[in-house]
Amino acid sequence: MNKRDVIIACDFAGAAETFEFLDKFTEEKPFVKIGMELFYSEGPQIVREIKARGHKVFLDLKLHDIPNTVKKAMSVLSGLDVDIVNVHAAGTIAMMEAAIEGLTRADGTRPLLIAVTQLTSTDQQRMEDDLLIKEPIDKVVMHYAENAKKAGLDGVVCSPLEAEAVHKHCGDDFLTVTPGIRFADGDKGDQKRVMTPAAAKEAGSDLIVVGRPITKAEDPVAAYRRCVKEFLG
């Protein structure tokens, strides 16, 4: 897998809409993210079908439960041959260690495992008012990232605003997967902490996750190519 890439968030309601979208890409096989809506609608088979088409898959289910439950769930997800899967870092180091244990196959291989720090829809005020976390959001993100590294994870999901600091604290090989990507002339939607693809590149993002700026574009393929050019060019 490339260290740097653009991942399209396929946040669609079902398989028909998803494949109608992916069929637009006749030359590329973009890296795709399958989230809760699509996975809960279609189940594991949607992952198998997208993998069979030649796409890399980030399965974005954000597991967060007691360690034993997460371990057992990961052992099931490991069989889907996804490329990346994730948990919530707030689930504790013990939970993340259990996730790795469950995810690791008998031959020692496993998908990459990353942890969500704080969602890009969360800002300082919401974190304080809703979650009763009074520390500065950048300090919280760094603490969660350090916990993920201690647990043996491969990286974190964070805002592109925090990617450089995560690398500084956890090393260049520790992946930063960053949603909250918007084109300079685009709408931020419900995201609070955002960057353009080019700015995310300069900030040290390894993998960027882009949804509506591509999936809702008049020409999704052109939007994807623009994003790739800005981020990888």
Image: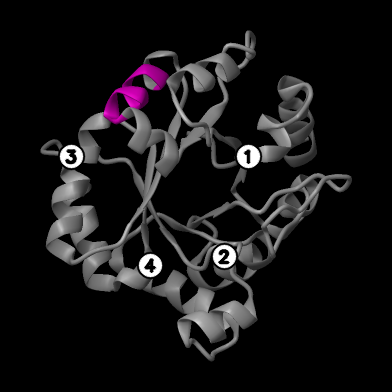
Q: Residues within 10 Å of mark 4 (few under 14, many from 20)?
A: many
Q: Nearer the viewer, mark 2 or mark 1?
A: 1
Earlier sequence position, callout 4 versus callout 1? 4
Q: Earlier in the sequence, mark 3 or mark 4?
A: 3
The residue type indicated by label 2 comes to His
**Residue receiving disc 3:** 76
Q: Secondary structure at mark 3?
A: helix
Q: CA distance from mark 2 to mark 3?
A: 31 Å
- Comes first in the chain, label 3 or label 1: 3
Magenta: main secondary structure equals: helix
Q: CA distance from mark 4 to mark 1?
A: 23 Å
Q: Which residue is located at x 47 percent, y 22 percent?
A: 55
Furthest residue in direction bottom, as rendered:
134
Determine which residue is flagged by label 2. 167
Q: Give the number of the mark in front: 2 or 3.
A: 3
State yes or no: discs 4 and 1 in contact (Cβ < 8 Å). no
Which of these two is toward me, 89 or 22? 22
Q: Are marks 2 and 4 in contact (CB under 8 Å)?
A: no
Mark closer to the chain start, 2 or 1:
2
Disc number placed over residue 22 in the picture, else none: none
Q: Which residues are magenta?
A: 43-50
| Three-letter residue code for mark 1 | Gly
Q: Which residue is found at the position 55% from the left and 85% from the top? A: 129
The residues bearing labels 3 and 1 have C-alpha atoms spaced at a distance of 27 Å
Inspect the magenta stretch and tell me whether residue 45 lies in it. yes
Q: Where is residue 209, by image quadrant? A: top right
> Dot 1 corresponds to which residue?
211
